[in-house]
């Protein structure tokens, strides 16, 4: 039976593709991607770069056997660095795969069977032709906006094999696509902060660590867990930030850490004072502090007058003149459950001492997530220390080594998303500029057209379910496109998106879903066509070390042969170009046939030429060939200037000539821009809104507040399949952290399997009973590979324990439309049903 | 030698009085044809009228908006902080007021800058800026549409990202002005 279907499938594909004229040209690209493995190191050590740092990888008989950090700058461990072998050899997609019904009839592919139906192996050439043909069909029938290729995820580092950008490059050149706005990490903050401080703030260099270590008296870590999150960077991690955390610990400075759970960071800073408010109540706590300082007169009136606008209008709310509720410490205490005395004491401590407040992003991934950081900036404005050495606030010290001083060097180039391609009536690619008179002088007209259909990234399920629906977003109206084709690379939406069961439902709407995937992730299992893709260790590349520090440049030399039939994303999209519109499109995509090493050398030389042109830059940069054959990172030098960097200092020195990017040029505690939007869920000033679910609500739909923070032993869902799983899994499930009193109440013991559930879904997790979470709160790390007992079935229990089956898929507010993963109530009970063996890391049916 | 002469001939033939030109990068501004003291910056992509050539300097005229509270800056518009010509804090330029409304004067002013670095049409440099933006700012993240931010938000947003791109120093103001002039609140 299987045989017949296979043969029928192959036959059908062959027949329908005969009409694709470029069929014979496909093999023409193979010389570009030759499997030359003669120069791979079989036995020895190779240096490469990863999100979790520069690694020294040991090879034995052509296999990776070990990996260790290249930089040894601190004693703080990084568990992500030793699992390279598992990232190469475990859970791989081996061959091109197509879902059975899709292969039989792409025009009636039975999307409802997605996830449950078996896959059929096809040849790479046939998969390429199939995708090219169906993409063209979708664009012709439904328009480019019906192709969603926003794609989203942490992919791998590397400036050539940058999968998401390679996808965008292909989709731009071949005719356009719908993209997405913003991201899951900072959805709320990156929209509110430009209104408040004039730029996004979250992805910016921050006050340098040496300044904080020298000048701050009190350091507040508000909802931030750097011991976990500084293990990784968006580029190659520079491993410098941990050394500063060690110095902070040794400094003996007063540390206040505010978090509903005793995070890895609180356990590391064992002398720190742990303050544990109820989840999602930080704004109330901050308002209580502000109210206390105001009434005591302990706030910086001069700073507020010179550097901010709207404090007077905010203070009317603070004192209850607008709503009859004075936001006293008693009021705050009744919400956040921190006693009044502590709130007052902390507020005065911050005012009386040079205080630096670092915040993470967890509290803005909650309902009304725009408010906490706006309120934090308002509190910092009252303290008046913004722009002073060691004072003020930061929304970035926990991420990608912000605060590590920027070194004096040069930046390498990287693959880009190119421009929109144009085609003549016969379908021939004619270049990236329209010959028509409508080509705007700025070359931006196409981008505006495509961006009109772009929507906030976390609204994906809503958009799939409701084409044509309009939503409000930051003062604009967005109309969802009618998505019928999804192409995803370098990401895993079935791990990162909220309310997985709604996503399963939404995922059954489009006709076609294609993925390039290294592993059989839950998202790959929910696709129609899956290309087996190389991991970063099977290709050559180059990357910057240190997002903000510009620490240096890492070579990324290929370690092992391409596994099974895995292809580089670059090859897949180059071949798709050929199949889609022939040699002209292929040439535009590859810039006339550039190979991997051509790009690497070109990008290296972008930096090298800058260095050569700037004699005062002293570096150890060598010509490319030497750099590559030596296989050693380039390291740049630090400067006094960046060691002493203080964010907002230039603004404080001269608010007229160095204004912020807000309408007033000042910090906006009241925003006229937001006032004009007239949203009921985001006022013109920071304020307390009750979240849709929280422990203080009257009729709770479930008993416990679930937090799903960044995992300690993963990069989101990356590395879930590695050997680390055995070190943290409990009864082979993702751990759930439960307070002893709650566990006793539910008769749950350490090591028990726990059913965690609410109206949205159910999962199995393994109990860890611990005082590290407060009563009423449970914690399950995000980034778990969704593993339904009945694949493809809505409502199926997740055997691996992904918390996103229980989270809520509604936006933070109309302003930012960020996700609210930290706002969710759940129930727990001891699981007594039959054992459900884990299948998260194995291949689906037919593969 | 020949190259130098050819260069001078070319430069002077391009300098007919009252030519409107656009500079491609930030230029130093002087109060006269000889003094060595830089008193301000002329920003790229703004329409500048060339009045004369004096020695190795160009005398130019520019029209723009002057905020009565900050007379040392000539802006491109009265809607946002897009600099055309910025003098040092202690310099108040001599201006001719063409029109006055509320907080703003529309003014012309004259000053000097060095030779070169201009083009007769603004479109090609804007197109180059657009490409610099899309090529360099789609390396790490999805390219934001230029109208994702306002004209006031763009300078600090762009500057905070700049270190992570290989964009050269000479192009920073070109790209900044391009972004500001195509921002969400600058649409016609």
Image (cartoon, coloured by chain):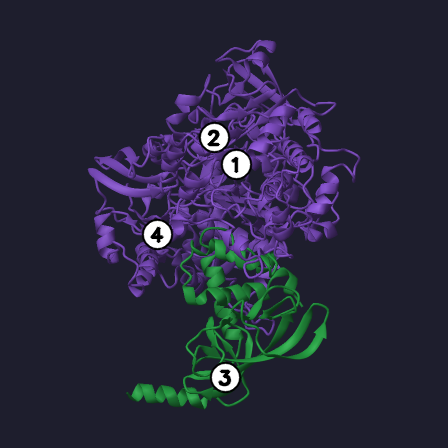
Give the chain letter at badge 2.
A
Chain identifier for the purple-coloured part of the image:
A
Q: Is residue B81 above or below residue A57?
A: below
- The alpha-carbon separation of the residues under discs 4 and 1 comes to 29 Å
Asked whether the residues under the numbered discs 1 and 2 touch, taking CB atoms below 8 Å apart as contact, a structural biologist would say yes
* Mark number, residue A639: 4
| Residue placed under numbered mark 3 in the picture | B59
Give the chain letter at badge 1.
A
Between circles 4 and 2, the one closer to the viewer is 2
> Is residue A446 visible to us here?
yes
- The alpha-carbon separation of the residues under discs 1 and 2 comes to 10 Å
Same chain for labels 4 and 3? Say yes or no: no
* Mark number, residue A254: 2
Number of other residues with Cα within 10 Å of mark 4, as a class: few under 14, some 14 to 19, many 20 or more: few
- The alpha-carbon separation of the residues under discs 2 and 3 comes to 60 Å
Query: Horizontal placement of A117 versus A680: left or right?
Result: left
Between circles 1 and 3, the one closer to the viewer is 1
Number of other residues with Cα within 10 Å of mark 2, as a class: few under 14, some 14 to 19, many 20 or more: some
Chain identifier for the green-coloured part of the image:
B
- The alpha-carbon separation of the residues under discs 4 and 2 comes to 29 Å
| Local SS, label 1 | loop
Q: Nearer the viewer, residue B146 or B75?
A: B75
* Mark number, residue A189: none
Residue under the image location 34 percent in, 34 percent down:
A81
Same chain for labels 1 and 3? Say yes or no: no
Query: Horizontal placement of A263 versus B180: left or right?
Result: left
Q: Position of residue A267 (x, y in %)?
A: 45, 24
């Amino acid at each position: 039976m299987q045989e017949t279907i296979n043969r029928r499938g192959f036959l059908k594909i062959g027949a329908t593709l005969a009409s694709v004229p470029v069929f014979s040209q496909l093999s023409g690209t193979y010389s570009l991607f030759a499997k030359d493995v003669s120069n791979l190191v079989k036995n020895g050590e190779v240096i490469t770069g990863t999100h979790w740092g520069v690694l020294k990888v040991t090879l034995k008989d052509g296999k990776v056997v070990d990996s260790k950090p290249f930089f040894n700058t601190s004693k703080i461990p990084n568990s992500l660095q030793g699992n390279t072998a598992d990232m190469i050899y475990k859970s791989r997609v081996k061959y091109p795969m197509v879902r059975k019904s899709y292969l039989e009839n792409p025009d009636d592919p039975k999307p409802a069977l997605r996830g449950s139906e078996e896959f059929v192996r096809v040849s790479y050439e046939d998969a390429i032709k199939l995708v090219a043909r169906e993409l063209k069909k979708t664009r012709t029938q439904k328009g480019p906006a019906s192709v969603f290729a926003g794609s989203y995820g942490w992919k791998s580092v590397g400036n050539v094999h940058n999968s998401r950008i390679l996808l965008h490059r292909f989709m731009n050149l071949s005719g356009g696509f719908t993209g997405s706005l913003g991201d899951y990490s900072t959805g709320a903050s990156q929209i509110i902060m430009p209104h408040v401080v004039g730029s996004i703030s979250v992805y910016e260099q921050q006050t340098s660590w040496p300044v904080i270590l020298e000048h701050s008296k009190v350091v507040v870590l508000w909802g931030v867990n750097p011991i976990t999150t500084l293990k990784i960077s968006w580029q190659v991690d520079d491993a410098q930030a941990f050394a500063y955390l060690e110095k902070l610990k040794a400094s003996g400075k007063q540390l206040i850490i505010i978090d509903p759970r005793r995070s890895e960071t609180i356990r590391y800073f064992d002398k720190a004072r742990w303050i544990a408010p109820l989840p999602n109540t930080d704004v109330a706590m901050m308002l209580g502090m502000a109210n206390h300082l105001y009434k005591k007169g302990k706030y910086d009136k001069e700073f507020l007058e010179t550097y901010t606008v709207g404090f007077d209008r905010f203070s009317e709310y603070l004192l209850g003149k607008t709503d009859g509720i004075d936001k006293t410490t008693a009021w705050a205490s009744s919400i956040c459950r921190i006693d009044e005395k502590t709130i007052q004491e902390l507020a005065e401590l911050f005012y009386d001492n040079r205080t630096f407040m670092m915040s993470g992003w967890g509290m803005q991934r909650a309902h009304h997530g725009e408010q906490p950081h706006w309120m934090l900036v308002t509190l910092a404005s009252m303290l008046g220390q913004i722009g002073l050495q060691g004072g003020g606030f930061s929304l970035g010290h926990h991420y990608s080594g912000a605060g590590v001083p920027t070194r004096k060097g040069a930046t390498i180039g990287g693959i880009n998303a190119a421009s929109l391609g144009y085609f003549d009536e016969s379908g021939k690619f004619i270049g990236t500029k329209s010959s028509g008179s409508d080509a705007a002088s700025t070359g931006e007209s196409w981008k505006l057209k495509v961006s009109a259909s772009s929507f906030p990234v976390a609204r994906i399920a809503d958009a799939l379910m409701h084409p044509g629906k309009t939503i409000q977003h930051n003062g604009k109206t967005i109309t969802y496109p009618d998505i019928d084709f999804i192409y995803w690379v370098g990401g895993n939406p079935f791990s990162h998106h909220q309310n997985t069961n709604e996503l399963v439902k939404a995922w059954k709407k489009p006709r076609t879903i294609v993925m390039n995937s290294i592993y059989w992730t839950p998202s790959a299992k929910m696709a129609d066509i899956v290309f087996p893709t190389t991991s970063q260790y099977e290709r050559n590349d180059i990357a910057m070390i240190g997002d903000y520090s510009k620490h240096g440049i890492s070579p990324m030399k290929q370690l092992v042969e391409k596994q099974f039939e895995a292809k580089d994303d670059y090859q897949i999209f180059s071949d798709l170009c050929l199949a889609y519109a022939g040699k002209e499109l292929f040439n535009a995509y590859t810039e006339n046939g550039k190979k991997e090493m051509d790009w690497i050398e070109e990008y290296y030389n972008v930096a090298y030429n800058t260095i050569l042109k700037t004699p005062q830059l002293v570096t150890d940069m060598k010509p490319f060939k030497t750099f590559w054959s030596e296989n050693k990172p380039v390291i740049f030098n630090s400067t006094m200037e960046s060691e002493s960097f203080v964010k907002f200092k230039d603004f404080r020195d001269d608010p007229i000539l160095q204004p912020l990017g807000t309408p007033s040029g000042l910090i906006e505690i009241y925003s006229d821009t937001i006032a004009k939007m007239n949203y009921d869920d985001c006022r013109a000033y920071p304020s307390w809104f009750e979240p849709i679910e929280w422990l203080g609500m009257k009729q709770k739909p479930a008993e416990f507040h679930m937090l799903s923070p960044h995992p300690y032993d993963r990069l989101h869902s990356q590395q879930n399949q590695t050997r680390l799983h055995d070190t943290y899994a409990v009864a082979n499930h993702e751990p759930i952290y439960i307070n002893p009193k709650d566990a006793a109440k539910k008769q749950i013991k350490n090591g028990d399997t726990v059913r965690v559930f609410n109206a949205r879904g159910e999962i199995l997790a393994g109990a860890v009973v611990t005082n590290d979470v407060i009563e009423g709160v449970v914690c399950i790390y995000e980034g778990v590979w969704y593993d339904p007992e009945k694949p493809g079935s809505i409502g199926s229990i997740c055997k691996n324990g992904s918390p996103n089956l229980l989270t809520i898929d509604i936006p933070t507010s109309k302003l930012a439309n960020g996700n609210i993963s930290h706002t969710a109530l759940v129930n727990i009970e001891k699981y007594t049903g039959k054992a459900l063996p884990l299948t998260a890391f194995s291949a689906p049916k037919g593969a | 030698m020949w190259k130098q002469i050819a260069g001078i001939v070319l430069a002077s033939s391009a300098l007919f009085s009252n030519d409107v030109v656009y500079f491609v990068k930030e230029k130093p501004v002087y109060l006269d044809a000889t003094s060595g003291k830089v008193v301000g910056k002329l920003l790229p992509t703004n329409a500048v009228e060339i009045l004369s050539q004096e020695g190795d300097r160009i005398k130019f005229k520019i029209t723009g908006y002057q905020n009565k509270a900050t007379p040392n800056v000539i802006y491109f518009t009265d809607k946002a902080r897009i600099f055309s010509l910025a003098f040092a804090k202690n310099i108040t330029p001599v201006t001719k007021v063409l029109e006055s409304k509320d907080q703003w004067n529309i003014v012309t002013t004259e000053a000097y800058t060095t030779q070169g670095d201009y083009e007769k049409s603004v479109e090609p440099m804007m197109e180059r800026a657009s490409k610099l933006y899309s090529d360099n700012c789609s390396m790490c993240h999805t390219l934001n549409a230029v109208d994702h931010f306002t004209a006031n938000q763009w300078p600090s947003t762009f500057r905070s990202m700049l270190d992570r791109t290989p964009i050269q120093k000479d192009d920073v103001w070109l790209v900044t002005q391009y972004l500001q002039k195509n921002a969400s609140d600058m649409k016609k």
